[in-house]
Amino acid sequence: CGGGNGGSGGGGGASQTTRAKAAPTAQAAVEEEDDMEFANSIVSYNVLNYEIKRLQDTVDALTAKGQIVPLAYGTRIQALEFRREMLQIQVDCGALSMEAYMQQLREAIPREKAKSKELKQLPGGAKRALDAFKRAQMMQAEIDEAENAAA
């Protein structure tokens, strides 16, 4: 089983980065986040499932209303699904043990909380701050559930 970062970060990524740097507003910083970078930063299988469902529900709601679905939703969902598959492969191949997985969650929780705090300070960042906090809570619940099952 090979590792690999995967990702199709081709030509489009560079222009997004350039645009984000060209836009001096904090809102642009809040809005712009590379899909694969976002997906790869998630270490929790439960959080990946939550993010995929949340985005898919948004796509479904827009479709039901007859509105145009931005392509960004599709690429973000694909990135999250890819990350979820890679996580599953790591577990299936034995490259990621339950202990290592739990340690990843323990390390990711303070990062998500710090990200939440940082985003909260930015204009327009309140929703993303809440999302980051929810991810931290989900990971903590996952740890608690695993520890209770082991006890």
Image (cartoon, rainbow, N blue to C red):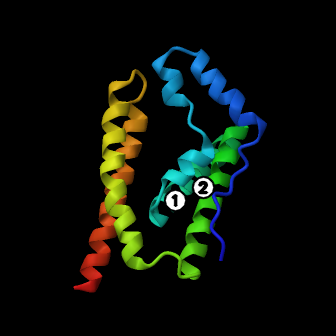
Relative depth, front residue between 121 and 52:
121
Relative depth, front residue between 65 and 106:
106
- What residue appears at the point 66 percent right and 40 percent down from the top-left corner? 62
Asked whether disc 1 touches disc 2, contact meaning CB atoms under 8 Å apart, the reply is: yes
- What residue appears at the point 22 percent right and 85 percent down from the top-left corner? 151
Residue highlighted by disc 1? 48
Q: Which sits earlier in the primary sequence, circle 1 or circle 2?
A: 1
Q: Is residue 140 left or right of residue 6?
A: left
Residue highlighted by disc 2? 80
- What residue appears at the point 32 percent right and 77 percent down from the top-left corner? 146
Return the x and y of residue 98 as percentages of the image width and height: 41, 78
Establish if 28 lies above or below 115.
Answer: above
Amino acid of disc 2: Leu
Establish if 112 lies above or below 25.
Answer: below
Could you say which disc has been placed on residue 140 in the image?
A: none
Q: Judging from the image, what secondary structure is the residue with disc 2 in?
A: helix
Relative depth, front residue between 138 and 106:
106
Return the x and y of residue 25 as percentages of the image width and height: 50, 15
Amino acid of disc 1: Leu
Return the x and y of residue 106 as percentages of the image width and height: 31, 62
Q: Is residue 44 left or right of residue 145?
A: right
Relative depth, front residue between 33 and 131:
33
Image quadrant occupied by the N terminus: bottom right
**Quadrant housing residue 130:** top left
Q: Marks 1 and 2, Cα distance to the nearest angstrom?
A: 6 Å
Residue at the right extreme of this rendering? 11
Return the x and y of residue 35 as percentages of the image width and height: 61, 44
**Quadrant housing residue 18:** top right
Residue 68 in sight? no
Q: Judging from the image, what secondary structure is the residue with disc 1 in?
A: helix
Establish if 133 lies above or below 23.
Answer: below
Residue 51 in sight? yes
